[in-house]
Amino acid sequence: MNKKVVGIVGGLVVIAAGMILYTSSGANQNAKKAGDSTSSGASVGGKVLALGSTALQPLAEQVSKSFQDKNPGVTITVQGGGSGAGLSQVSDGSAQIGNSDVFAEEKEGVDSSKLMDHKVAVVGIAPVVNSDVQVSNLTKAQLRDIFTGKITNWQKVGGKDQKIVVVNRATGSGTRAVFEKNILDNQKAVQATEQDSNGTVQKIIATTPGSISYLAFAYLDTSGIKALNIDKVLPEKKNVEDNTWPIWAYEHMYTKGEPKGATKEFLNYFMTKEVQKSIVPKLGYIGLTDMQVTRDAKGNVSEK
């Protein structure tokens, strides 16, 4: 009888041990899956260079900081240089990610078939003037005439008698390409001072009386400048979302083929709720899921 009891107890012990091992194994598998999806932990490591668009730069820097806090084994370097530089350097393998305000198909000299597009946000772009300019609204036609040199004095558009100082973006700038595509209607821009970054333009407009240029929404909140309405439409997030505001673009992060390792995990992190619903709007960008329309490389806009 004692032997029988001992046998039963032993069997129960074996079964219990098996259940513990099974449960532990399942928990480990679930933990592993969770780790894969959140990119958290020491399993992610490596270096990533992301460069190009200065319109995307503030967002890329903030998201990279958040990602590195969660993944201390990863080093991400974010640089400007313009969309053209980003597309060129990711194409030749100098960078893991090329940041761009324009589709690769729109850039001459870039083989878009070798690049993979990762849209991470939407950026609004607004005309900006020095705060002493006594104008708050322009029609699209007036804005086009200013940037093509047909209007040279603010008095012509309701302001005071003051010379208009145009500040343009440098050739290769994605922000410039987006602005000209939506405002200039293929007309040639006037010869003017050119600068290669949103940050530099922001400083020049804030300190130059009578000046005008254009900036990504993320750069509008500063003293010395003010954004202009176009045809009485305000440069606001909600107006970009339904295409009422005409000057906007996707923020692209291109890779040469399928991303791998830390690059892949970083791009995956960009699409998380934490980034799209928190970091993106906080910095003045628009999350992809908030857009009510889509736009293709040819500029065609359609409802979602």
Image (tube, rainbow, N blue to C red):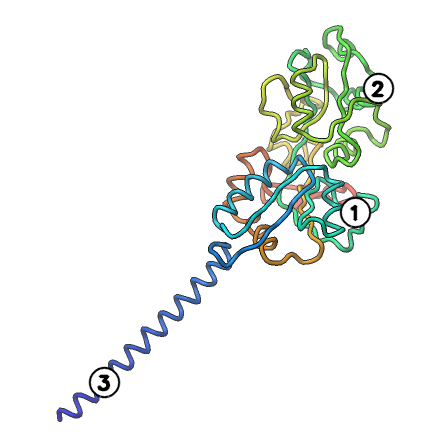
User: Which residue: 50% across, 45% down?
Assistant: 274
Horizontal side of residue 113 vs 1, given as left or right? right
Number of residues whose C-alpha sits closer than 10 Å to that of mark 2, classed few (under 14), some (14–19) or many (20 or more) = some
Number of residues whose C-alpha sits closer than 10 Å to that of mark 1, classed few (under 14), some (14–19) or many (20 or more) = some
Horizontal side of residue 135 vs 265, given as left or right? right
User: Which residue: 41% across, 66% down?
Assistant: 28
User: Which residue: 73% across, 53% down?
Assistant: 115
The mark found on residue 10 in the picture is 3
Q: Which three-letter amino acid code belongs to the residue tagged 3?
A: Gly
The mark found on residue 149 in the picture is 2
Distance CA(mark 1)–CA(mark 2): 29 Å
Q: Nearer the viewer, mark 1 or mark 3?
A: 3
Relative image position of residue 25 (x, y in whole percent): 39, 71
Relative image position of residue 41 (x, y in whole percent): 46, 55
Task: Say what secondary structure mark 2 lies in.
Answer: loop
Q: Which three-letter amino acid code belongs to the residue tagged 1?
A: Glu
36 and 78: which is toward the camera: 78
Number of residues whose C-alpha sits closer than 10 Å to that of mark 3, classed few (under 14), some (14–19) or many (20 or more) = few
Distance CA(mark 2)–CA(mark 3): 93 Å
User: Which residue: 65% across, 18% down?
Assistant: 206
Where on the picture, by quarter, is residue 303?
top right
Task: Say what secondary structure mark 3 lies in.
Answer: helix
Q: Which three-letter amino acid code belongs to the residue tagged 2?
A: Gly
